[in-house]
Image (spheres, rainbow, N blue to C red):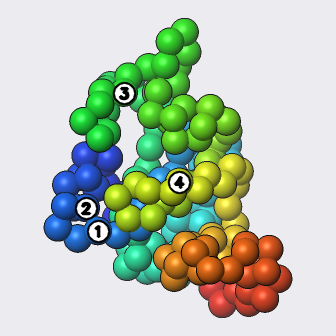
Amino acid sequence: KINWMTVEQVQEKMKTEPRKVYVDIYTDWCHWCKVMDKKTFTNKYVIEYMNANYYCIHFNAERKDAVTFNEKQYGLYPKSNTNSLAVEWTNGQLSYPTSIFFDENFINPQPVPGYMEINNMEMIAKYIAENKHKSIPFEKYKNSFKPTWK
């Protein structure tokens, strides 16, 4: 299984072992979120790679409790059912599911809206984890990428 952690746990781990961060933003009612849980997040290659290279957070966008991130409290966004941290991380472009890939210490968020098939997960996870995003434009990387996860 993917080693899902809380926002607070990841911030704590970051102090001693900085690592890339992957956030799956979902809701309980989202059909494609459930499909991703069943298909993408149960794939052995996805599990192995994500656990080795990322801290992973399964974040319910409609969580009612407050979450602390960077010493700031995030609760429900005014007049909505959405946690304000989900709004911030997606730059207000809420869509479910949304995968967000961060560099170490939650820097440089890259939100990717929509259902993520295994081949897309492999391509983007490796692009960020291997720091290719710092030297190769995504379109060029994408055109030469050969998926290996089945």
Q: Nearer the viewer, residue 20 or 118?
A: 20
Q: Position of residue 49 (x, y in %)?
A: 46, 79
Secondary structure, mark 4, is strand
Task: Give how far apart the Cα atoms at labels 4 and 3 are.
Answer: 18 Å
Q: Nearer the viewer, residue 97 or 111?
A: 111
Q: Which mark is residue 18?
A: 1
Task: Give how far apart the Cα atoms at labels 3 and 2 are.
Answer: 20 Å
Residue found at the very far front of the displayed protein: 135
- Which residue in the protein does label 2 denote? 14
Which of label 4 and label 3 is nearer to you? 4
Task: Give how far apart the Cα atoms at labels 1 and 4 are.
Answer: 15 Å
Query: Label 1: how many residues lie within 10 Å, few (<14), some (14-19) or many (20+)?
Result: some
Q: Which mark is residue 74?
A: 3
Q: Position of residue 149 (x, y in %)?
A: 63, 85
94 relative to 122, above or below: above
Amino acid type at image mark 1: Pro
Q: Quadrant of the N terminus?
A: bottom left
Q: Considering only order in the chain, which callout, 3 or 4, is on the residue closer to the N terminus? A: 3
